[in-house]
Image: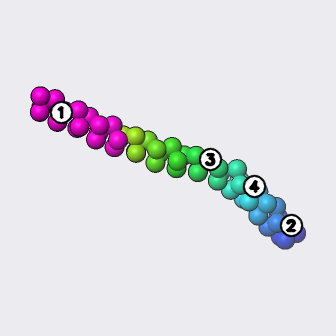
Amino acid sequence: MPTTELGNMVIIIGSLLFLLFPIFIVLLNYFVVKRAVVKGMQKYHRMIETQEEDE
């Protein structure tokens, strides 16, 4: 019965994707935010350094 096996595979893969998709989005958001924070911190530190040099 290859049709039922194929149907079960589709259901299993579909449910796995359904479960993994939110995790993927969360990880993506995490990495984007982390990169933005790191870049922001670098800019902030550079600003502080330049202000200190001016004094």
**Within 10 Å of the Cα at label 1, are there few (<14), some (14-19), or many (20+) other Cα atoms?**
few
- Residue 13 visible, this orientation: yes
Type of the residue with mark 4 = Ser
Residue 11 percent location from the top left of the image: 79, 60
Contact? badges 3 and 4 (CB < 8 Å): no
Give the mark nearest the N terminus, 4 or 2: 2
Which residue lies at the image location 70% right of the left edge and 50% below the top edge?
A: 19
Q: Is residue 54 left or right of residue 2?
A: left
The residue under label 1 is 51
Residue 40 percent location from the top left of the image: 35, 41
Residue 29 percent location from the top left of the image: 52, 47
Residue 42 in magenta? yes
Element at badge 2? helix
Give the mark nearest the N terminus, 1 or 3: 3
Q: Quadrant of residue 9?
A: bottom right
The residue under label 3 is 23
Type of the residue with mark 1 = Gln
**Within 10 Å of the Cα at label 3, are there few (<14), some (14-19), or many (20+) other Cα atoms?**
few
Q: Label 4 to label 2, Cα distance in Å? A: 16 Å
Type of the residue with mark 2 = Thr
Contact? badges 4 and 1 (CB < 8 Å): no
Contact? badges 4 and 2 (CB < 8 Å): no
Give the mark nearest the N terminus, 3 or 4: 4
